Amino acid sequence: MAVIQTENLTKYYGKARGVIDLHLNVEQGEVFGYLGPNGAGKTTTIRTLLGYLRPTAGRATVFGLDSFHDAIAIKRRVGHLPGEFALYPHLTGEQLLRYFAHLRGGVDWSYVRTLAERLDIDLTRRIGQLSHGNRQKIGLLQAFMHRPELLILDEPTSGLDPLVQHTFYELVDEARANGQTVFISSHILPEVERLCDRVGIIREGRLVAVEMVAALKARALRRLEITFEAPVPAEQFTKLPGVRDVTVADRHLRCTVVGSLDAVVKAAAQYTVVNIRSEEPSLEEVFLTFYGRQADNAAKEAHHAA
Amino acid sequence: MLRNVFLKTLRDVRGALAWWAGGLGLMCLWFVTFFPAISGAAGLQEYMESLPESFLAMFGVSETTLITTLAGFLTVELMSAWLPGLTIAFGVSIGGGLLSREEDEGSLDLLLANPVPRWRVALEKFAALIAFTVIVALACWVGLLLGIAVINVEAGDVHLLDGMLSLTALTLFFAALTYCLTCLKRGRGLAIGVGAGLAVVTFFTNSLADLANLPEWSRRFSPWYYYGGDVILAEGIKWEHFGLLIGLTVLLVALGVWGFSQRDLGT
């Protein structure tokens, strides 16, 4: 069953583009990663799903309910962490969470304490005295505290230290195990790889791909630099499957590889290898390489249609 | 204090409330204690009558206001301009920030992540401002009563409570106007400018209408006419005027709540 569904969802801010013709399905119990560079339309999608924004065209449903008109019924079942949010600086963490708990009609306070311990957050301190990372933890806590059926988290690990990030990953894993659905917006590829079953990639307001994470990884680009004991001929590598942009300077070979490194490693093994350095490209580069052309074509088609 | 949006909002403004209620209450008490010196001053009424009408009108009074009576004194010194000017100042500034401050700072997104309807958030926030205004008006009333007790004069014919009621209605009208604008469109700068600007313009429209040779009915476009600051302490409240101000306030708040429920947030 689709927990989140959008049909031709379009949002413009005046003449400025938000999202265009979005078709998205997120199934119950899956962890869905929503990827895209800043300004691509991730936050617009989330704000539309939760009724902060009214679609310009098309529609969005959550649990089969209309995102704008049934926003309250939806929010009863959703835990939401906004991308950019402020907390009330004069309240303590506990006061803020109790306030939100009252607005929700009550939550299990022992679970709140457990979450606070796991996220290592002191709820007795005033929010104004907390670091960005600790405020982010409180934001996460309020999203998880009522054990919602659906979690919608916009850039959830922003400002978190690695230990707390790990705790957050555990919380998402537990949510998945409990049958909860999780929708995570992010531009951090390793995080999405770690957490998500499926990803949707949005670029310039359009959904350019929805894939299983394993498929995305297989298509990911990798920059490779191999240092040999002696110079090697470049043509040994240029014709290997998935290998591009080969350059050889003295004893250093540089190239980019799509998918498996197997062929290039085996070819290199014919010579004496001193060092291998592998570098994952930024997500932005993956977008530009795999989806740039598709998105550009889609934009052109839309332009011609208009 | 954190059970709902109404109580949370009151908690947020409790410092301002203490200062405004305490400050204006003391100011009222202080002003009353000057009355014996004024009422005993020989020739003051004649002096006032000799002043240019335009000068008196600037303060919202006329040459017929009897400054040597307690009602006339309080009208000139407090009710005609100063006190409503100050209460409108907090009404407009707080009313302008109730929603828009949260929207600008980003806490509104988190608040509305909870299953609370927007109309309820908007209504409870304005209800907190109503409570704020009523408490300040009550503090002014208590200040006036204490002042009168201190100077020990007969004040049975001064409609103090009527004055405070009308003051509350006028303040809430301009607060609601400002609030309504922030509900309809994000941002408080323009809304506060419009609220405060209209308060000033309509004050002079009402007080200077005669001098500017404007027809009498033109005053009826000013909320200050229905407030009746120049006559309310002496003549008492006109319920139809009070009702009109409250009715317009309700309409503005209703329009604001509706607009806030319909519009995009954070844009």
Image: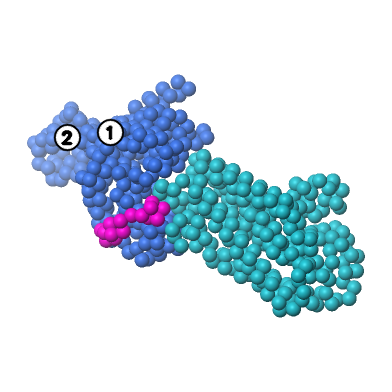
In this view, the residue in front, B226 or B196, is B226
The residue carrying pointer 2 sits among few (fewer than 14), some (14 to 19) or many (20 or more) residues within 10 Å by Cα, namely some
Disc number for residue A260: 2
Q: Given the image, what chain letter belongs to the residue carrying mark 2?
A: A
User: Can you give x and y, in whole percent of width and height, for residue A111 in the image?
Assistant: 28, 57
Name which residue type carries label 2: Ser
User: Can you give x and y, in whole percent of width and height, for residue A281 in the image?
Assistant: 27, 40
In this view, the residue in front, A263 or A302, is A302
Mark 1–mark 2 Cα distance, whole angstroms, equals 34 Å
Same chain for the residues under marks 1 and 2 in the image: yes
Disc number for residue A1: 1
In this view, the residue in front, A119 or B152, is B152
Label the blue chain with its letter. Answer: A
Query: For the residue labelled by badge 1, is the local secondary structure a helix, a strand or a loop?
Result: loop
- Residue A302 against residue B46 in the figure, above or below: above
Side (left or right) of A277 relative to B127: left
User: Can you give x and y, in whole percent of width and height, for residue B149 in the image?
Assistant: 71, 77
Q: Residue furthest front?
A: B156
Name which residue type carries label 1: Met
**Toward which corner of the image does residue A133 lie, by quadrant?**
bottom left
Q: Given the image, what chain letter belongs to the residue carrying mark 1?
A: A
First reached walking from the N terminus: tag 1 or tag 2? 1
Residue lying at 48% horizontally and 46% vertically, measured from the top left: B118
The residue carrying pointer 1 sits among few (fewer than 14), some (14 to 19) or many (20 or more) residues within 10 Å by Cα, namely few
**Magenta stretch in the rendered image:** A100-119
- Residue A31 against residue B171 in the figure, above or below: above
